[in-house]
Amino acid sequence: MLGSLYAVIAIGYTLVYGVLQLINFAHSEVFMLGAYGSLIVLQLLDPGENPTALASIGFVAMAMAGSALFGGVTAYGLEKVAYRPLRRRGAPRLIFLITAIGASFFLYNLAGKLFGRDPMTLPEMYDNNEVFSLFGAGVNITQMLQFLTAVVMMIGLDLLVNRTKLGKGIRAVAQDAEVASLMGVDIDRVISRTFVIGGVLGGVAGFLFANLNQVSYTMGFIPGITAFAAAVVGGIGNIRGAMAGGVLIGVVETMTVPIFGDEWRSVSAMVVLILVLMFRPMGILGKQVGRAA
């Protein structure tokens, strides 16, 4: 479950890197704002106590829609305002990186100003009952929701990238943006849509993560760094690599807790990152990408 969440967040990093060769460090704030989007929707709907099964499904669907909307709009705004002017002026890669960090700090503080500095909890949408037991471990509704939603999104993205016209455009720009432009691919449109797709996935991941924890303006930092590590482990720029890296990091973190304690959870992710980079610098499924857009 944890690994699938990391994988969905990591896809946002790897999609942007594939088309721009840019590490979008503001993606962690897209994730955070997606969680706030779901919180706002649920506060407006007010699930109340003991909603029916049909109402619970509706609340979950609307919360996901709110998080996807917030994440997608935020990611589109980042590309339009922060990155596109730099790209058109041929700015150095270092300027892109500094801009990404600056955008991250801006969104981080803006969220704290708008929504407050105190953590908040999502309204209860359903009774979190145990569904079944696997090898003596109980699996509840929330865990099923997290895992299945993440898997469906990853499968859907894989089909979109490999089976659709937009996916062909994304792959063409990632392989060689200059040649793709000469062949008639609208680079700006492809990049904008890529950011939106990554933002939607990151926003929904924010809702899923908040459903387990709390909503806070600081919630994006640790999952964002861990998901970035997962993207690098899998092979930055490779979508299936991001999925594999996310699952690997999640499993390692989860197994670390009962053995070494919760304080070693984040350390274990970085250890995996270092070990993979020592023996395979391009990541598990990574390969050299083409020229950036």
Image (spheres, rainbow, N blue to C red):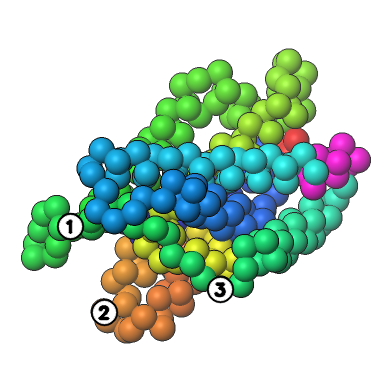
Q: Position of residue 291 (x, y in %)?
A: 73, 38
Label for residue 129? 1
According to the picture, the residue beneath numbered tag 3 turns out to be 118
User: x, y (%) of residue 44?
Assistant: 49, 48
Assess whether residue 73 is covered by the magenta stretch. no
Mark 3 lies on a secondary structure that is: loop
> Which quarter of the image is occupied by the N terminus?
bottom left
Residue 83 on the magenta span: yes
Q: Amino acid at mark 1?
A: Asn
Asked whether the beta carbons under mark 2 and mark 1 sit within 8 Å of each other, the answer is no
What separation in Å lies between label 1 and label 3 (alpha carbons)? 28 Å
Hey, what amino acid is under mark 2?
Pro
> Mark 2 vs mark 3: which is more N-terminal?
3
**Which of labels 2 and 3 is toward the front?**
3
With 201 as the anchor, is 85 left or right in this view? right
Foreground mark, 2 or 1, reads 1
The reply to whether discs 1 and 3 touch (Cβ–Cβ < 8 Å) is no
Relative horizontal placement of residue 207, taking residue 136 as reference (left or right): right
Judging by the rendered image, the residue that carries numbered circle 2 is: 258
- Choose the circle earlier in sequence order: 2 or 1: 1
Q: Quadrant of the C terminus?
A: top right
Image spot of residue 248 (x, y percent): 37, 59
Distance from disc 2 to disc 1, alpha carbons, whole Å, reads 24 Å
Furthest residue in direction top, as rendered: 184
Give the residue type at disc 3: Asp
- Where does the magenta region start and end? 82-90
Name the side, left or right, on which 75 lies relative to 244.
Answer: right
Determine whether the residue tagged by mark 2 lies in a helix, strand or loop. Answer: helix
Query: How many other residues sit within 10 Å of disc 3, few (<14), some (14-19) or many (≥20)?
Result: few
